Amino acid sequence: METSHHNHQNPAFIGDDGRSTASTVVISSNSPVPGATAAGRDNADQEAGAGKLSEERATWGKGVEFLMSCIAMSVGLGNVWRFPFTALDNGGGAFLIPYLIVLFLIGKPIYYLEMVIGQFSSRGSVKVFDLCPAMKGVGIGQALQVFMLSTYYAALVAIIGRYFYESFRNPLPWAKCHEEWGSNCIDSAPDARNWLPQDPQDPQDDQPIQKNYTINDESQRVRTSSEWYFVKEVLHEKPDIIDGIGLPNWELVIGLFVAWLCVFLIIRRGVKSSGKASYFLAIFPYVIMGVLLIRAVTLPGAADGILYFIKPQWGKILDPKVWYAAVTQCFYSLSVCFGNIIMYSSFNKFGHNVHRDAAIVTGLDTITSLLAGFTIFGILGHLAHEIGTDDIGTVVKGGAGLAFISYPDAIAKFKQLPQIFSVLFFLMLFVLGIGSNIAMTSCSVTAIRDRFPHFKQWQCSLFIAIISFAIGLMYITPGGQYMLTLVDFFGASMIALVLGIAELYTIGWIYGTDRLCKDIEFMLGRKVGLYWRLCWSIFTPLIMTVILIYFYATYEPLTYNDKIYPGWAYSIGWTITAFGILQLPVWMIVAIVRDPGRTLGEKITGAFTPTKNWGPLDPLLREQYHKEIDNELTPKRGQGVWPAIKQNIFG
C-alpha cells in the first residue's frame, strides 16, 4: 500500500482515489468531468454517462463497509441452503475435494479479478465492458441473470419469513404430526422415537414400537412432521404442474412484500445506507450458526452424518457431474460472474487493498460452507438414527426443501424453549437472504443508473422492487417450487457458466492478462504472482470450458422430485437461457456497427479495443495511466503470435 501512495500522490491531492474521501461525491457543474476528456471514438452518450457517473458515484464510508458488504453478499443462502444439499446430491465427502479444487482454480481467481476491474474503473457491471465494447453483452446478460436470481431469492426469503412468524408458537407447528397428513409421519419433537404410526382406531395407543423402515416407494416413505409441514402447510405443493401452477399463497405474499420492503429501505440511498447495514448483515448470522452447530453435533447419531459428509466416495470424484455441481456451487456461493462484485468494488477508493479483501471473503466463505455442512449432516445423521436407516442419503429429499425440513426438524428436538432457537435461526436465514438480495438488486440498480444517470437511486430501487415483487408471486404458488427449480437451472446455472467463460476470455485474452496485471500494479503498487496469471489466462477459462462442453453433451431434461416438466415449462426455460446468451452476439454487432472506423476491419478492431476514457475515474490519474500503459505494452507488439501469447501469460 505504501508503494501505491508513493506512485499516485502527485496527480490528485483529494484522496488516494483521486476523489473526495467523503462517502458521497457531488461535483459542481463547473468542475471538470472525467467523461469530458474522452475523445476520438467515444460517442456523446458515453461521455454524458461518464460525466454524470463522476457526479453521482458514491464511495464506501469506510473500507471495512466494503468488506462487510462482500461477506453479507457472498456468505448467504448459497452456503447454508445450497451447499449442504448439493453435497448431499453428489455423494457427501466426494463433493468436498472437487469443491476445494474448483474454489482454488476458479472461485478465488475470478473473485479477485472482478474486485480489481470494478475498483480500477469505478464502473458498474455493464459499463465496465468499456474495456472491450464488443463484449458488452456479457455485462447485460449478467444483469438480466442477476435480476431473475433476485426475484426467486426474495421468494425464498418470504418462506423464511413465514417460518419466522410461526416460530413464536408453542408448540412449534411442525413439531407434531397432523392427522390429515396420513400415517407415514413421525413427530420431529424430542419425545418421538422410531415407531410404527399410531392406530387411528385407538387414540390411547401412544406406545412407541421400535421398527427399522425400508424406504422403497416415495409415497410410502416415512417423513418427519417438519417435512409434511413444509409440503402441505407452507407450500400447499401440487403433485405436478400440468394444469398450471395455481394462485399465490396469501401468507407468503405478505412475506414477499416484507422482503422487498427491507431491500428497498436498505438500498434507497445506495452504498451510504447499505454500507451501514452491512455490519449487522455480515456478523449476526455467525453467532446463530455457532449455537446451532454446537446443538447439531451433540445429537445422537450426528457423528455418522458428519462422517458421511467428510468421507469421500472415491468413485464419485471422477464423475464430471460432481465437478459441474462444484463449479455452479462455487458461482452461487461466492456470487462470481453475476456482476455483484464488480458493482460493489466500483464504489471503492482507488488504492483500496482488494487483494486482502478477496482472500478474506473467499476463505471465510469456504469455512462457512463447511460449518453449514457439519451442522446439516449432523442433523441428517440424527434423522437416520431416529428412523433406523443406515443410508444418510435417503433421509430427506434434496432441493430447496432441505433447509426448510432438516433445520426445523433439528430445532423441534430442542427440549428447552425451541421457540428461541427457531426465532433466531430463521432470523439468521432472513438476514442472510436479505444481505445477498441487496447485492443483486444493487447490481440491477447500478446497471440502470450507469446508463440512465438522471434516474434517482430511490426511484430506480422502488421500480425494481415493484417489478420483482410481481414476478416473485409466481414462486409462492402451489407449483412455485417447480418454477423456482426451472428458473434456477435455465436462468442462473446455464447462463452463468456461458457468460462467465465469455467474461474470462474477454479479460484474460482480448483485454489481456498482462495488461490487467499492469493495471493492478498501477493501482495497488504490487506485483501479480504467477498463480494469478496462470489462472486468469489458462486454468480458469479452460476448466470452465471443459465443464460447459460436458454439460451440454450429457444434457438431460430437468426434473423436480423426479417428475418431468410439461412441454410449455421447458419452452419457457430455453427461452430464458437463449435470451441471456443471445445478448453476446447482439451487442457485439451493435458495437461493431457503432464504431467510427472506416472499413469493416477497423470497426471490428475498434470494437475490441478499450474506449478512450477507459481507466481510473480521476482524469489526472487516467492521463498518467495511459502514458504508463502505452510504454509498458509496446515492447513485444508486432513480433508474432507466440511472443504475444508468452507476454500475455508471463509478462
Image (cartoon, rainbow, N blue to C red):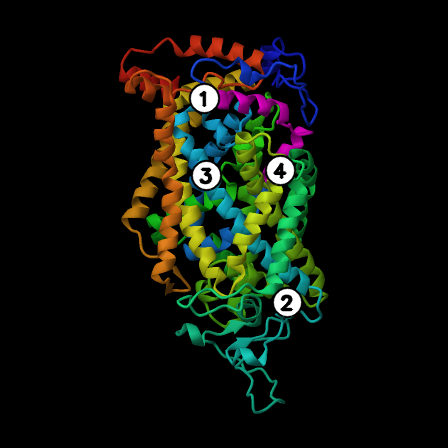
Foreground label between 3 and 2 = 3
What residue is disc 1 on? 516
Cβ–Cβ under 8 Å for marks 4 and 1: no
In the depicted view, which residue is nearer to us: 491 or 606?
Answer: 606
In the depicted view, which residue is nearer to us: 631 or 569?
Answer: 569
Residue 88 image offset from top left, x and y in percent: 45, 57
Residue 252 image offset from top left, x and y in percent: 60, 61
Q: As displayed, is residue 427 above or below residue 147?
A: below
Residue 585 image offset from top left, x and y in percent: 34, 34
Cβ–Cβ under 8 Å for marks 2 and 1: no
Residue at 69 percent across and 40 percent down: it is 279
Judging from the image, what secondary structure is the residue with disc 4 in?
A: helix
What residue is disc 3 on? 142
What residue is disc 2 on? 412
Measure how far apart labels 2 and 1 are at the Cα level.
52 Å
Judging from the image, what secondary structure is the residue with disc 3 in?
A: helix
Q: Earlier in the sequence, mark 2 or mark 1?
A: 2
The kind of residue on which mark 1 rests is: Leu
Measure how far apart labels 4 and 2 are at the Cα level.
32 Å
Judging from the image, what secondary structure is the residue with disc 1 in?
A: helix
Q: Earlier in the sequence, mark 3 or mark 2?
A: 3
Q: Earlier in the sequence, mark 4 or mark 1?
A: 4
Cβ–Cβ under 8 Å for marks 4 and 3: no
